Image: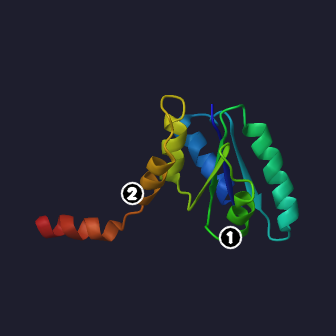
Amino acid sequence: MKGILFISHGKMAEGIVDSLTMFFGEKPKNIDHLGLSYDEGPESFKNQLEDKIIHLNKGDGVIVFADLFGGTPANTASLLANNDCQIISGMNLAMALECVGTRENSNLSIDELVQTGKEGIIYINDILAEKNKNN
């Protein structure tokens, strides 16, 4: 089973894992999180990141979801990117749910996960305005 690691500035990654636990009724297996604290340097974060990736890789590799492209967590993870460690930035709950929900039953497609994340971004006011226009 592919490992999944959520990384972020602050506690966003922890919140994603907490939300996944609500949806699945328990914390999904082989998942972890790591948040960069305001007083932490990149080297300390990198050491923790490496340890978590090693721990999560049970032979199928690890997908790392980062909060923001160009930020310290994503930049640090990019130093570890290879065939066993795939990095996706711009994480959101929609892509996290898709990844966890399908990783045991199908071959995960990074392109599909990214597309799910994009499709999860919706301006609800436009939907409501269209609905009100049709009523």
Tally the numbered discs. 2
Residue at horizontal 70%, vertical 31%?
59
Q: Is residue 105 left or right of residue 45?
A: left
Task: Give whichever of 88, 120 is nearer the camera.
Answer: 88
The residue pinned by badge 2 equals: 119
Task: Report the front residue among 124 and 57.
Answer: 57
Give residue 115's mark. none
Residue 65 drawn at (x, y percent): 62, 53
What type is the residue that disc 1 sits on? Answer: Gly
Tell me which corner region of the image, top left, top right, bottom left or bottom right, holds residue 4.
Answer: top right
Labelled pair 2, 1 in contact (Cβ < 8 Å)? no
Residue 99 in the image: above or below residue 29: below
- The image quadrant where one finds the N terminus is top right
- The answer to whether residue 9 shows anywhere in this view is no
**Residue 99, how many percent across, how many down?**
53, 42
Seen at 39% across and 57% down, the residue is 119
Helix, strand or loop for disc 1:
loop
> Mark 1: few, some, or many residues within 10 Å (few <14, many ≥20)?
few
Which circle's residue, 2 or 1, is located before the other in the chain?
A: 1
Element under disc 2:
helix
Q: Amino acid at mark 2?
A: Glu
Query: Where does residue 77 sit, x and y in percent of width and height?
Result: 72, 58
Q: Residue at x 19, y 64 (%)?
A: 131
- Residue 6 x, y percent position in the rendering: 66, 51
Task: Work out how far the residue at label 2 is from the one at label 1, CA to CA, in angstroms.
Answer: 23 Å
Q: Nearer the viewer, residue 128 or 108?
A: 108
- 101 versus 33 height, above or below: above
Location of mark 1 (residue): 71
